Every structure is written in C-alpha cells, then in structure tokens.
Image (spheres, rainbow, N blue to C red):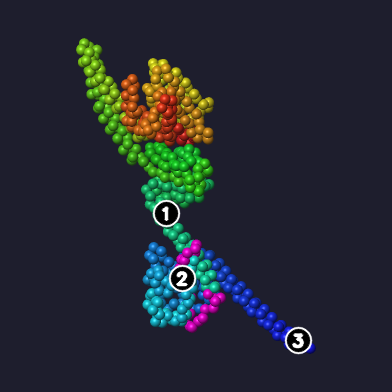
Amino acid sequence: MHDERPNQGEAHRSLVERNLRLTEEVKRRVDQLAAINTVATTVSQSLDLNVTLEVALDAVLSVIRVEAAGISLIDEEAGELVLMAQRGWVQDFVTEKPMRIKLGKGISGQVLATDDVVITGSLAGDDRLAVPAFGNEPVQAMAMAPMHAHGKIVGILSVISHHPYTFSDGEITVLCAIADQVGVALDNARLYERVREEQARLSAVVQSAADAIIATDSHSRINLFNRAAERLFQVGADDVLGRPLFDSPLPRRVLAELRRAMARVEGREGSTVIDLQMENGEFWSGVISPVYAPPGHTGKSAEGWVIVMQNVSHLKEAERSRVQFVQSAAHDLRNPLGTALSAMAMLQSEFEMAEDMARILEIAIDGIVRMQDLIDELLNLEHIESGVGMKHQPVDLSDLLTRTGTEMVPLMAEHHHSFTLELEPDLPPVLGDARWLRRALENLLANAIKYTPDGGKITLRAFTSGDGKEVTLEVEDNGPGIPPDAQVHLFERFYRVAVTEDVAPGTGLGLAIVKSVAEKHGGRVFVRSKVGEGSTFGLVLPVGQVDDECH
C-alpha cells in the first residue's frame, strides 16, 4: 500500500495557502471599499466647491500612495477642460492662470473619447501633451480617470507619481470608484455654487428694486423684506424677519387690507391689487400674489405670499390734476353746448317754421343732447378709472339693488317690461363706493331696457359663490341676444352692437363704465348670451371683510 500522508500534507498546505490568498483578497477588497467609503463620506460633507476640491485631493492621496494629484472639470460653455485644483505639483497651474485644454486635445482628450482610464509612464518628450509646460513636471507615472455624475463625464481625476510606479488593477478600480464619488460631489457643489450665485444676483435685484417687496412662507412668517420696504414702512428688516406678517409692526391699515386681499385670492391663480389712503394722506398701491408648490396647482393653501407695494401719491396727484383738467375742459364744452341747446329750444317753441326746417332743428337738438351725454359719460369713466375720491366702505347690496331696481321701474313701465328682483337672503356686504356700484347697475338695467322688446322680461338678481368669497350681481333679459363674435367687444369703449332703427343709439360707454367699476372694486364682468334667447350681463365682486381697524 502507498502511504497517502505526504499527499494529504500537500493538499492541506495548498488549502491553507488558498485560504490565505482569499483572506488577503477579501481584506484588500474590504480596504478598497473602506477607502471608497472614506472618500465618499469626506467629499460629501461640504457643498462649497473649493472646499470639496481640496478635501477630495486629500482623500485621494490618502488612499493611493503617490505624490501628486489634480482635478479638472469640464467647462461646457467654453468647450474646455479646466484644472480646478492640484496637490504636489512643482508648477502652479491653478492660481493665476488655470490650465485650460480644448476638449478632445492631449491625453485628456483620449480619456474623454474612450471614457476609460489612461495610464502613462514618464511624460518627458511626450508629443501628446496639450500644454508643453506640463512636461517640466517630474512625472514618472500617471493615471487619469474620468469622473461621472448623472450619467455624463464631468471631469478627470489624475494621480501622479514622481518615481517609476506600476498602478495595480486594484488601485485602478479604487481610482475609478473614487473618481465617480468625487465627480458627483463636485457636480453637486458646482450646482450649489450656481444656485448661490443666482440667489445672490436675485437678492441684489430685490434689494435694489424701487418697490417695497415682502415675502412670507407657508406659515405667514416674513422671510424677505427689502430696503425699499424698510423705507416705505419705516421699519428695519431685523424687526420683521421671521415674525408672522399679521404680528409685525406694519401699519394696521395695511395689514387689514392685506388680510382681505389674501382672502380674495387664496386657492386661486393670479394676483389682486389693493389701493389705500394712509392716515397721513399718502396713497399706497400693492400687488398681492399667492405662491403655490408645485406651480399651477389651484385649490390648495398658498405656500407663501409675495407683496409688492409702493407709494403712489405722486401718481394720484398727477391723476387728480388730469381729472381736474378734463373736468374743466368738459365744463368749457358744456357751456356753449348748453347755450346752443337753449337757443334752438327757443327757436323750436317760439317760431313757426316749415316741416323740413323743424326736422333739421330737431336733428340738431338731438345731436347736442347726445354730445352732452357723451361728455358726461367720458367724465364718469375718467373719474372711475382715476380712483380719485373712490370710497372704500361696506355696501349693503340688498338695499342697493332694491333701491336701484325700484327707481328704474318707471322706465321699464314705459316699455311694458315685467321686472323681477331676486335677492339671496343675507347677502354679505362688499367694500367699495355705493354711488359707482349703483351707476353700474343702472347702466346694466338701462342696457336691458334699451334692447328688450316691449312686453319683455328683465330680472335683477344677486347671489354668493359656493365658497362665499364672491357676490354676483346680474341683469337678465329675454331680448334678441348677441352674436358670439360681438360678445368679446361689448365692454370696450365706444363699441356698439348693430341695432335696429327703433333702438336709439348710445354713447358706447355704458358697459365700459360697468367694467371699470367692477375692476376698481377688485372684481370682473361677464356676459352670457345666445341669439334669440336673451342676454345676461353681470359683475362679480369680492366679499368685503369689515375690519374696524380700517374705519
């Protein structure tokens, strides 16, 4: 029999050696993973680009035992690879004039083209160098690995030995892994730098703006208060930043108006405008806009608010002067027109004349009357749009509609129109000027009377919206209706729908006045009509929130 003990001994030794190699391999892999982990943890601790670059170089040189390293990033706009940081080099290729290499040139071009690691020996006399001065570096061995972030190459990580050196497969594996870790960290840092730059530019613009700008977060805390706001409100930014808007030292009149404006637009897209007169006589105007996240989602609570305000006293004064000029000019026009009308009326009553002459005189009188009406309407429109003297008080809509409808009944009776008043119980008040709201309703009713055939039906109604934030006032008739192509122009100045001979021509300003009144009250106008089925004209107004602080 053969003695098998020597063979068993050899097998045992072989097994032990294999286990040792496996242990060493596992330890090497663990060390590599630990090194990669260390680099990843280290470079992710800062979003400052310069800090990240320096930390990355330290981490790389602690893992791969060579003398020098460098990090270059791609500048896509310039089409160049730019050396951003270096460590252990003889020459400075970063501080005064960073090394720039056109993409595709030199050894780096080979790395970018192949998207793989490129290893070199000594670079002395190497004709691949895109920057000849780099040939003076004591490079005896170099490995260049592409850095990736978000699926694309963002730069190159280079490690350099000043002595002959052979990079092992394990070191190359670690280098590639580290390069990608550094690439992601640097890309994030670069994005952060861009965001900071944009924020700095935006902040400079906001702080330099002539308008007062205030912004709040989702909890209504003030997180932006620019220098113009400090001047307008005579309050320092440090006194309001971080405080709830409605607990801030801003004027109570302003806060009350802001609260009402925010209630009007909460849950909707778009902005609202406020105009208010301060106790010192100044006029302030503001635009209040909700901010939603994500953008475009309506029906949700605002994630914050942006308020832009300015002192418009000088504009109001200029507007008042303009209105006074228009009124003076209108007065100067009225006097000769009144004189001419009186003279013609005297001719008509005191002298007998031929039928054709009487007809000519009647046409002249009618023209003067229409011109007087036009002047009056233009004055009204100018007055409304200027906002001069516009009141801002609670208006009882039930009383307003009842009085307006009652006073228009005799005019309807002349045309045998039936009239219905439909009022929702407990209508909430609106804040505004009762005189001009009444004028708008009178214009809508007069329009219905004018275009509804004798014996027709006219309805004046008012009701609140489902959310209780708006009140709709509308006049409905069963007249001839309006073609769709004409409806879009109805509220324009001087626009008139083609009418039959039995309808007296108007000034074309009645509905324009309605639109102006609605907008000055923070509302809007609308029309619904079908040819042959009548029309409904109306205005939608925000519900007023009565606040004793404002009155």
Q: Are marks 1 and 2 in contact (CB under 8 Å)?
A: no
58 lies left or right of 365: right
Residue bearing the label numbered 3: 4
**Residue in front for this viewpoint, 107 or 257:** 107
Q: What span is in magenta?
A: 149-172
Q: Are marks 2 and 3 in contact (CB under 8 Å)?
A: no
Q: What amino acid is at disc 2?
A: Thr
Q: CA distance from mark 1 to mark 2?
A: 43 Å
Q: Residue at x 42, y 17 (%)?
A: 455
Q: What amino acid is at disc 1?
A: Ser
Question: Magenta stretch: residue 150 in it?
Answer: yes
Q: CA distance from mark 2 to mark 3?
A: 55 Å
Res. 257 visible in picture = yes
Q: Residue at x 48, y 77 (%)?
A: 119
**Residue in front for this viewpoint, 356 or 36:** 356
Return the disc, 2 or 3, that comes first in the chain's sequence. Answer: 3
Return the disc, 1 or 2, that comes first in the chain's sequence. Answer: 2
Residue bearing the label numbered 2: 114
Question: Magenta stretch: residue 363 in it?
Answer: no
Give x and y (percent) for residue 122: 44, 81
Q: Residue at x 41, y 54 (%)?
A: 202
